Amino acid sequence: VAEVRDLHGRSYRVGERPQDIMGRSRAWMLWLPWAAMAGISVLQYGYSIAATTLHGTAAAGAFWVLALWVMFQAGAAALTAALRHRSAVAPSRAMLVGALLCAAGPLTLAYTDSLALAVLGYSVLCGSGAGIVYATCSSTVAKWYPEARGARIGFVTGAFGYGAVPFIIVFTAGLSPANHAAIFTVVGVLVLAAVALSGLLFRDPPLGWWPPDVDPRLWAVDKRINRSLLSNAPAARQYAPGQAVRTTPFVVMYLIMVFAAATFLLAVAYVPIIAVTNGFGALVAAAAVGLLAVVSGGGRAVACHISDRFGRRQTLSAALLLAGCAQLGLVYSAYIHQAVPFVVFAGLSGLAGGAFYPLLASLVADYFGERNAVRNFGLVYSLAL
């Protein structure tokens, strides 16, 4: 085991294999977070379909619960990222806490119709739990894959989108006021099991760990090994969060996150209501939300690969342009009562909306350095939401 530095002054711990540290391949720290993220996806993408199925067009009021869920999820994610950066909490312990809090959401909806209890159980507790799980999975993957951080995080967080599809199908086909308590109870148990069992095996590598089969000094400068250097320059120095917030790029990223996240979350929440209001029916609503979730998840890793080749700023600009066009297409297709274009534009909205999260995370690392990348992106994410 040795510590080496590249020409940018960044230090790396080299010489240890994952098997030496935890007795398993580091692929475990890719697929276990993926499974946990798939487990909590129903909490965001499934909620809108469940609310529309149970309440129809009167579900608009129920989406305040989802809006507050997003706010608590973002705040908990930022706090967890800061704690994980300092190694103040073990990932397995954080995942257990997150699993219990996440399960509180569906169980609350199963056994009460009170809006106040729904806000407490789903928005506050469940939203916080989802933020803890999201940040723990992302930070764990980032620590085990420092040479492919953006693509691997994009792959894992992609499960947060398409993991909801089976639940969307169940909610559309069988959810009713008569059986919603039983279905939500099963959902809560499944979320608890998926997150807790996956998180039980989470482990962190030593601080600054680098995989032994890649030379970090060459990775920092050789464009044949690190293809992303062809279009993306690394940070000149490492910025702590307090330093990053005083820069112009941070303000620009914050504004992008504000408008892009608001547009995407509005689509997630209101696509099923718009579908039902315009007479498309529950099947079209489910198809639109399901396609949105699938391409939102699958498009994240694709966007990271494209950005490595063509540049992250250019790819982000294209994603934001696509998001704006998709929203206009959603409105117009609903106005002229065309179901097929409506579903297509919902998918394009999901593609663009899912892409900008990992793209912004990678840009944060490019501008402010990789040492505090998770904390800095958590700050952008939480302040914007």
Image (cartoon, helix red, strand yellow):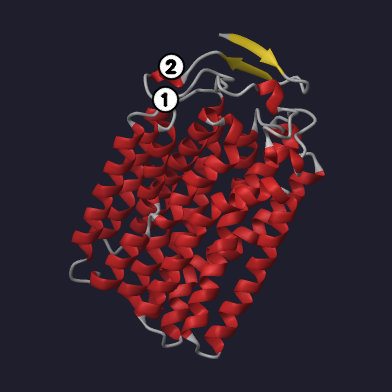
Classify residue 54 as left or right of residue 379. left
Local packing at callout 1 (Cα closer than 10 Å; few below 14, some 14-19, many 20+) is some
Of 275 and 68, the residue lying toward us: 275
Q: Quadrant of the N terminus?
A: top right
- Name the quadrant containing residue 215: top right
Res 162 → quadrant:
bottom left
Residue visible at 47% across and 35% down in the picture:
136
Question: Disc 2 vs disc 1: Cβ atoms closer than 8 Å?
Answer: yes
Residue sitting nearer the eye, 240 or 125: 240
- In percent of width and height, residue 296 lies at 51, 59
Q: Which mark is residue 30?
A: none
Q: Nearer the viewer, mark 2 or mark 1?
A: 2
Q: Position of residue 295 (x, y in %)?
A: 50, 61
Q: How crowded is the residue under tag 2: few (<14 C-alpha within 10 Å), some, or many (20+)? A: some
Q: Which residue appears farthest toward the bottom when viewing the image?
A: 336
Q: Is residue 50 visible?
A: yes
Picture quarter containing residue 335? bottom right
Residue under label 2: 21
Which SS class for mark 2?
A: helix
Q: Which sits earlier in the primary sequence, circle 2 or circle 1?
A: 2
Residue closer to the observer: 259 or 123: 259
Determine which residue is flagged by label 1: 203
**Which three-letter amino acid code belongs to the residue tagged 1?**
Arg
Q: Whole-percent x and y of residue 225?
A: 67, 32
